[in-house]
Image (cartoon, rainbow, N blue to C red):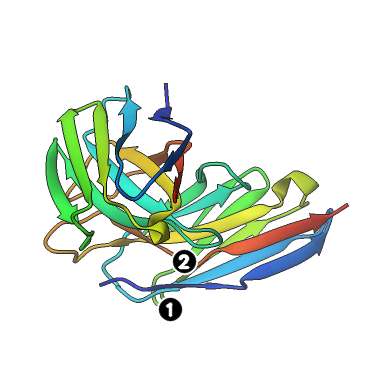
Amino acid sequence: GENVEQHPSTLSVQEGDSAVIKCTYSDSASNYFPWYKQELGKRPQLIIDIRSNVGEKKDQRIAVTLNKTAKHFSLHITETQPEDSAVYFCAATDMNYGGSQGNLIFGKGTKLSVKP
Amino acid sequence: DTEVTQTPKHLVMGMTNKKSLKCEQHMGHRAMYWYKQKAKKPPELMFVYSYEKLSINESVPSRFSPECPNSSLLNLHLHALQPEDSALYLCASSQEGGGRADTQYFGPGTRLTVL
C-alpha cells in the first residue's frame, strides 16, 4: 500500500516570508495529491490539489509542484500571513487497497507558525 | 452547497453506553467516509461506503458499526467503547468512490470522550 512521508513536522516563518512543505510517496500508481489545512479544533479543509498529469498548479499565494519521477510533491506558500498558521496535511491516493481505489493516505502533518 | 454536516458536535459517553454519530451531505456524492483523528495526528481511515455499500473496513473493532441508510446519510453506531477511543470522528464525502480519486470534503467532526 501507499506510504506518505511529510517534512518538516514544524515550521516557523516570519510574516511575509515563504513556506515550503515537502512530501514523498511510495506508490508510483498514485494519481491524486491533495493538501489540507486544519486549524485548531476545526475540520481539514482542502486548499489545493494536483493530479499526476500536471507538474504544477497555482492558486494565488499557494502552489503545489509534483515530481512523478522522484515521487515527491511540495506545497509552497508565498507572502505568509498569521492566518496561514495551522497544521497542513499532504495526502496521496492508495491505488491498491483491497481492490478499491481512490482512498487517501495522509502524511503526519506540518505545524506552520507565522510570526507577525 | 459544499458542506458536510455532523451531529453531535460533542459527545461524552460511558463504556457501557450505546450512541450514534450522524453525517449528512447534499452534494450528490456517492462515496462517504469515516475517519478517526487523535490529537496532533492525521486522520485515519475507518470505513468507506461507495454507492451505499461498505467497500472498506480498515480492521476496525466491532464496537464501531457503520450504517449508510441512503446516499446522503452516514451513521456510526458506538457500543462498549474504551477510553482510548476518545478522538475527533470526521465524516467526509466525495463525488465518486472505488475507482476514481476525487476531492474529499470533511465535516466539522464529533469530539468523542469515553469515560
Chain letter for mark 1 = A
Out of A79 and A100, give the one closest to the viewer.
A100
On screen, residue A5 versus residue B53, left or right, reads: right
Give the class, few, some or many, for how many residues have Cα within 10 Å of label 1's Cα (few <14, many ≥20).
few
Q: Quadrant of residue A32?
A: bottom left
Residue at image point 23% right, 59% down: B60
Q: How would you rate the neighbour count of disc 2 (Cα within 10 Å): few for under 14, some for 14-19, many for 20 or more? A: many
**Residue under circle 1?**
A70
> Which image quadrant for residue B77?
top left
- Quadrant showing the N terminus of chain B: top left
Front residue of this view, candidates A73 and A10: A10
Q: Earlier in the sequence, mark 2 or mark 1?
A: 1
Of marks 2 and 1, the one in the foreground? 2
**From what the image shows, is residue A53 above or below residue A44?**
below
Check disc 2 and report the residue beneath it. Answer: A107
Q: Are marks 2 and 1 on the same chain?
A: yes
Residue at (79, 63) in percent of width and height = A13
Q: Position of residue B22 (x, y in %)?
A: 32, 31
| Res. B93 visible in picture | yes
Chain letter of disc 2 in the image: A
Drawn side of residue A19 relative to residue B77, left or right: right
Instruction: Residue type at mark 1: give it.
Output: Ala
The residue lying at 17 percent from left, 42 percent from top is B50
Circles 2 and 1 in contact, beta carbons < 8 Å: no
B6 relative to B48, above or below: above
Q: Nearer the viewer, residue A95 or B56?
A: B56
Q: Nearer the viewer, residue B60 or A97?
A: B60
Q: CA distance from mark 2 to mark 1?
A: 17 Å
